[in-house]
């Protein structure tokens, strides 16, 4: 409310000054002075009133801005809740460019080619105990290779499902896997005597570790569909027990035993009915043997001249075959190409007879892939930084049955992210 005090003050002043003049005690100029002071006070009151009005307007503007900010904060909070799932997903992958030269004795000329391998995996953490993974990779449907040969006029290349699994952390130090996942079995020094590094088994697995003991078990499928007109469903299982021990300062032993029961006798070869990957076939083209593979392995990790050194032995025998039933790999690795400027060198000698293991799952590069080959693998690598490395692998192999020489050179530029 606006208060106009000038008439009231003027009236009061006239009454007071009237009495004053009547008494003859005040000069004529005093009245004018009082009137001026009243006018000044009135002007000041009007200014204060205008200031209060301005403050009320500013308060209204600030309240509106606060309401707008509150709405925006609420919207951002809801958006954050909707996007919170992204914080639980982790992406990782790698890319490899390879030059390869293959010199096979019974071929008229050497083979040169460039190949690429690209892989990406997304892992979603559902909660503290459960995660789900999805991986894509280049290449075709080969179960032991994700390489893609470059060429064909620059045509588009295929992308395939490489991983699709769940992983549940159970009681103690156990882990349950289901779907299509990385090989759950321990491989000494990453030996490919039984399992190629790119092989992704399908089925269920359980992993357990407690102190010095570890155990891995799996129930896996070669074919899960037994519909009419197709081959019977085929499954297999494996069990592995291992032990780790600290022998001396900076020296550790890893040793274990594995058993894989793969009952395929009488079945046609899997993946490619015309290719048994070195395994012996019966007259009707079916597998001649089952594969009950007993594996014994040992690996020693130590240091020499401040460099990590790993020495390993991997031996396997097919208990279901009467001949050509054993396989052996021995070797070492010195150094580790991980941080910038580091390097490593490795050597392996391997002899894998035709029916020692299921040829489908073994190394796809050694001797051209599959079983029935022996020879040497020489490797070297240099790391430019933590995520980039250059490596060289040279296979000097020959066929066990035909003594055909097989040399293979691979030069790889690798990137991890």
Image (tube, rainbow, N blue to C red):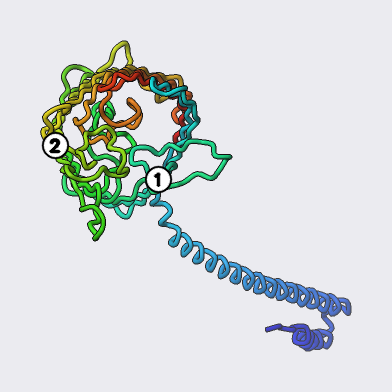
Residue sitting farthest toward the top: 305
Point out residue 343 in the picture as x, y percentages from the top left corner: 40, 19
Mark 1 lies on residue? 121
Point out residue 177 in the picture as x, y percentages from the top left corner: 24, 48
In the picture, measured across the screen, residue 2 lies left or right of residue 273, that is right
Assess disc 2: are there few (<14), some (14-19) or many (≥20) residues with their C-alpha within 10 Å of its C-alpha: many
Q: Nearer the viewer, residue 134 or 27?
A: 134
Name the N-terminal-most of marks 1 and 2. 1
Determine which of the numbered discs, if any, sits on residue 292 in the image.
2
Residue 73 vertical position relative to residue 94 in the rendered view, above or below: below
Residue 134 vertical position relative to residue 12 in the rendered view, above or below: above
**Distance of label 1 from label 2 (alpha carbons):** 33 Å
Q: Is residue 194 visible?
A: yes
Q: Nearer the viewer, residue 261 or 339?
A: 261
Mark count? 2
Q: Nearer the viewer, residue 55 or 349?
A: 349
Q: Quadrant of the C terminus?
A: top left
In the picture, measured across the screen, residue 23 lies left or right of residue 186, that is right
- The image quarter containing residue 376 is top left
**Residue at 54% across / 39% down in the picture?**
152
Assess disc 1: are there few (<14), some (14-19) or many (≥20) residues with their C-alpha within 10 Å of its C-alpha: some
Q: Nearer the viewer, residue 130 or 403?
A: 403
Q: Is residue 128 visible?
A: no
- The image quarter containing residue 197 is top left
Point out residue 130 in the picture as x, y percentages from the top left corner: 28, 52
Point out residue 87 in the picture as x, y percentages from the top left corner: 41, 51
In the picture, measured across the screen, residue 108 lies left or right of residue 64, that is left
Residue 126 vertical position relative to residue 94 in the rendered view, above or below: below
**Regarding mark 1 in the picture, which secondary structure is present there?**
strand
């Amino acid at each position: 409310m606006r208060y106009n005090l000038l008439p009231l003050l003027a009236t009061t002043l006239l009454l007071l000054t009237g009495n004053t003049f009547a008494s003859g005690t005040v000069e004529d100029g005093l009245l004018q002075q009082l009137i001026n002071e009243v006018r000044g006070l009135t002007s000041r009151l009007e200014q204060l009133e205008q200031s209060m009005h301005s403050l009320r307007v500013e308060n209204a503007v600030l309240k509106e801005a606060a309401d707008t900010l509150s709405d925006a904060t609420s919207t951002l909070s809801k958006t954050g809740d909707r996007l919170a799932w992204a914080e639980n997903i982790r992406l990782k992958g790698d890319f490899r460019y390879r030059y390869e030269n293959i010199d096979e004795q019974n071929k008229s000329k050497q083979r040169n080619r460039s190949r690429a391998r690209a892989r990406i995996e997304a892992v979603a953490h559902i909660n503290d105990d459960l995660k789900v993974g999805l991986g894509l990779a280049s290449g075709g449907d080969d179960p032991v290779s994700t390489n893609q040969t470059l060429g064909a006029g620059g045509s588009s290349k295929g992308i395939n499902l490489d991983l699709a699994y769940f992983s549940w952390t159970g009681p103690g130090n156990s882990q349950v896997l289901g779907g299509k996942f990385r090989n759950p079995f321990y491989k000494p020094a990453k030996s490919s005597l039984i399992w190629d590094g790119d092989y992704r088994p399908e089925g269920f697995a359980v992993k357990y570790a407690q102190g010095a003991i570890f155990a891995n078990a799996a129930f896996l499928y070669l074919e899960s569909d037994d519909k009419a007109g197709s081959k019977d469903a085929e499954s297999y299982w494996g069990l592995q027990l291992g032990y780790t021990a600290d022998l001396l300062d900076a020296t550790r032993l890893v040793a274990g035993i594995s058993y894989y029961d793969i009952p395929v006798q009488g079945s046609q070869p899997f993946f490619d009915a015309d290719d048994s990957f070195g395994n012996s076939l019966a007259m009707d083209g079916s597998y001649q043997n089952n594969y009950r593979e007993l594996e014994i392995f040992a690996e020693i990790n130590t240091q020499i001249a401040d460099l990590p050194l790993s020495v390993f032995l991997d031996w396997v025998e097919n208990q279901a075959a009467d001949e050509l039933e054993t396989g052996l790999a021995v070797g070492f690795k010195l150094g580790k190409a991980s941080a910038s400027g580091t390097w490593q060198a490795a050597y392996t000698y391997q002899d894998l007879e035709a029916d020692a293991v299921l040829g489908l799952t073994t190394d796809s590069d050694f001797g051209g892939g599959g079983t029935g080959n022996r020879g040497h693998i020489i490797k070297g690598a240099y790391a430019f930084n933590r995520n980039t490395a250059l490596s060289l692998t040279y296979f000097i192999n020959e066929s066990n049955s035909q003594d055909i020489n097989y040399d293979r050179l691979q030069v790889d530029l690798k990137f991890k992210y």
